[in-house]
Amino acid sequence: MSSSLFQSFACRGLTLPNRFVMAPMTRSFSPDGVPGENVAEYYERRAANHVGLIITEGTVNDRPGSANDANYPLFHGEAALKGWQNVVEKVHGKGGKIAPQLWHVGMVRKPGTGHNPDAQSDSPSGVTHTGKAVMDPPSDEEVADMVSSYARSAKSAKELGFDAIEIHGAHGYLIDQFFWDVMNKREGKYGGDLLERAEFAGDVIRECRKAVGEDMPIILRWSQWKQQDYSARLADTPQKMEAFLNVFKDAGVDMLHCSQRRFWEPEFEGSDLNLAGWAKKLTGLATISVGSVGLNGDFFGAFAGQGSEAASLDKLFEMMDRGDFDLIAVGRALLQDPEWVTKVKEGRMDELKDYDGKALATLY
């Protein structure tokens, strides 16, 4: 077992006992947007079993069209925030640390869905991933409020006692739609080349920093791939990636959560560094890696109900020991087995389970 996985980690006002992170996993178990006792207990069980940092499922902000499912948890309004207060208290009661993932689905939302079915969906320019314009581009005032909506959620996270925040800028959702030239056809602010498009997230980070102060870490999750196009890439060279990621570093982000389908796959030819490894090398920031940890199949198969066999952690140990990245996020393995980190810590590797994709909807 890699001892480096159980070394402490510190960032701003956050200190973690180990390098394991619970990856954010959407579950749609919050009717009308309110996380109930079952949600609090779900996170409490992972906190009780040595997960260093829990990142919640995506929580949607107060833009009316931020969600495409009325069972996604809200991060605004008295009832929802009271539910999240209970979650924080349960996790802290077990000695855990927790960050909400702040989310807006953007044009992934279909008209007539979510908590406000009559609302208009938000987007950079009213263009879908097919390049088709389906609505008028939002005004500068509307885009400014999209930025502010993340900061309003960040302020609530600070007031509720969360330990950090994660901004969801990956997987083809709103922030990632601003990054992607296929969907961002804006003229003027936040349009143009990749660095100009990245400034939308840069301003989100700056506004969130104002909301949370100097002691609370800000994490940005990002990816090359989009759910609309798994082969998409924002930066196809290290030089382009460095310039892109430095927008967020300059804005004040603390950690980059680098999402890829399989964490062990190299990002660029000629190096065995993965996406998180390159991000750390290029920026000097702390990075979180993620992607099929402990399993031999990626998560796309899980959406179709497919299972995955438990896989060796030797590659993870190797990459952690040489310092490729700082933290490792675990998704499906930890979803199925709340004691997964405990078993790794105690060397009970033979007890790590295969993943049952057919049980996805009922797993807590």
Image (spheres, helix red, strand yellow):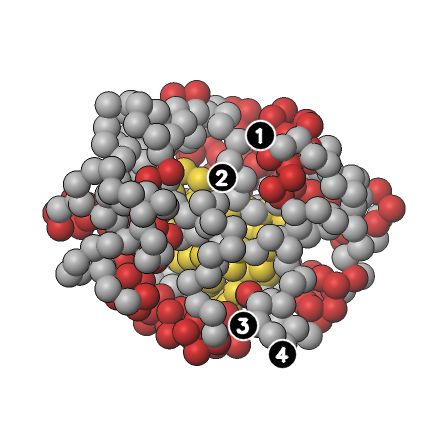
Q: Is residue 72 above or below residue 48?
A: above
- Which residue is labeled 3 in the image? 278
Q: Nearer the viewer, mark 3 or mark 2?
A: 3
Secondary structure under tag 3 reads: helix
Q: Earlier in the sequence, mark 3 or mark 2?
A: 2
Secondary structure under tag 1 reads: helix
- Which residue is labeled 2 in the image? 57
Q: Residue at x 38, y 60 (%)?
A: 215
Compute the Cα span from label 4 to label 1.
Answer: 45 Å
338 or 181: nearer the eye? 181
Q: Dividing the picture into quarters, in which one does residue 120 lie?
A: top left
Compute the Cα span from label 3 to label 2.
Answer: 26 Å
Q: Are marks 3 and 2 in contact (CB under 8 Å)?
A: no
Q: Nearer the viewer, mark 2 or mark 4?
A: 4
Q: Are marks 3 and 4 in contact (CB under 8 Å)?
A: no
Q: Are marks 2 and 4 in contact (CB under 8 Å)?
A: no
- Which residue is labeled 4 in the image? 270
Q: Amino acid at mark 2?
A: Glu
214 or 31: nearer the eye? 31
Q: Dividing the picture into quarters, in which one does residue 149 lie?
A: top left
Q: Nearer the viewer, mark 3 or mark 4?
A: 4
Q: Earlier in the sequence, mark 3 or mark 4?
A: 4
Q: Residue at x 41, y 31 (%)?
A: 73
Compute the Cα span from label 2 to label 1.
Answer: 14 Å
- Which residue is labeled 1 in the image? 41
Q: Are marks 3 and 1 in contact (CB under 8 Å)?
A: no
Q: Is residue 324 above or below residue 137?
A: below
Q: Nearer the viewer, mark 2 or mark 1?
A: 2
